Amino acid sequence: MTTRPAHRAAAAAIAATALLSLSGCGGDGPAPAAAGTVSVAGVEVEKDQTLHDMLPEAIRKAGKVRVATDVPYPPFEMFVKEGESDLTGLDYDLGQALGGKLGVTFAFTPQKFDGIVPAIQAGKFDVAMSAITDNKDRQQVVDFVDYSQSGSGILVAEGNPSKISTLDTLCGQKVAVQTATNQLDLLKSHQAACAKAGKGKIDIQTFPKDSDAQLALRSGKVVAQVLTKPAAGWVAKTADDGAAFDLVEDPAAPGGYNASPNGIAVSKDLPELTDAILKALQALIDDGTVAAIYNQYGVASIAVPKATKNAAVD
């Protein structure tokens, strides 16, 4: 996600769709398993004593990592039921898997997005898992363990009747997008490429909410909608039990267009925790747990093949 705050209204709309479908996948969420293991996305995650020993002494003694998260922001973080405090989502599941591998609990607490980094700096939280974009400015005050690469994606009607495959195939077509988003900027900036290719301009149809854009797509008024790729993947997976929309996968942009790294933000006062999370994440990538979690939320393509620290370069 490039500038997360710009999508808060969209997230709320998508969350409403997500809540209707959680009953179908809730059984795959984190759950107690055999002693010393945690079950996440159908995978049993076992404690790695070597990684546990890497943790700061205070965290080992407390038995938990304090995690800040801004809810809702599907598919990364959502409430299981509206009005209740139980959490679900990609970040939450990944946190439980990391906790299982490290032998501690990742205890999530909702926190407004703009207050997350200051709260880590103040020592109220150890880390944040909230689809936070890793960038050089934020790296000045927190360290990142990067776990996904995501940008903008294309949502089409089930079966992709207009055979949309790339941004170029949107040229000359009616395309829906939410107002005042990076996705609108992306479509506007692509008009020059359409003209250079001798194709018609994209007929951009703007809507105040993502849900309105999806109604236009359902009714055939547009051939596609452009929104964040994680949100597009989640909508494709959950709307009408996966029968309403498809997610376009462009091999040239696996994480989405203009993709940037998302990271787990860790207090700079806890370098041992950063290193332990980095190694635990790589172990979960290697054994397939990360893929299982991402698949559960319809966003397998945004996963990274290797865990990195402070990957953003600008």
Image (cartoon, rainbow, N blue to C red):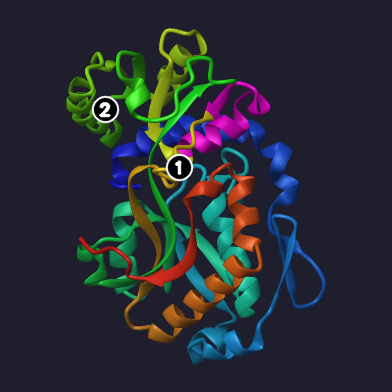
Q: Residue at x 63, y 75 (%)?
A: 101
Residue situated in front as seen by the camera: 95 or 189: 189
Task: Please rate how many residues cluster around mark 2, counting C-alpha atoms within 10 Å: few if below 14, some from 14 to 19, many from 20.
Answer: many
Image location (x, y in percent) of residue 199: 25, 16
Q: Residue at x 44, y 28 (%)?
A: 165
Any part of residue 124 in sight: no
For the magenta stretch, what is the residue range?
231-246
Image location (x, y in percent) of residue 111: 40, 56
Image location (x, y in percent) of residue 192: 17, 26
**Image quarter of residue 262:** bottom left
Q: Relative to 185, is 164 on the left or the right? A: right
Residue that label 2 marks: 187
Residue that label 1 marks: 251
Residue situated in front as seen by the camera: 262 or 123: 262
Picture disc at residue 272: none
Identity of the residue furthest to the right in this view: 34
Image location (x, y in percent) of residue 125: 41, 71
Any part of residue 21 in sight: yes
Q: Residue at x 66, y 39 (%)?
A: 22
Label 2: element kind: helix
Marks 2, 1: nearer the viewer: 1
Q: Relative to 115, is 296 on the left or the right? A: right
Disc with the residue nearer the chain's start (2 vs 1): 2
Residue type at the position of mark 2: Leu
Residue 132, placed above or below residue 197: below
Q: Relative to 195, is 292 on the left or the right? A: right
User: Marks 2 and 1, Cα distance to the nearest angstrom?
Assistant: 19 Å
Label 1: element kind: loop
Residue type at the position of mark 1: Pro
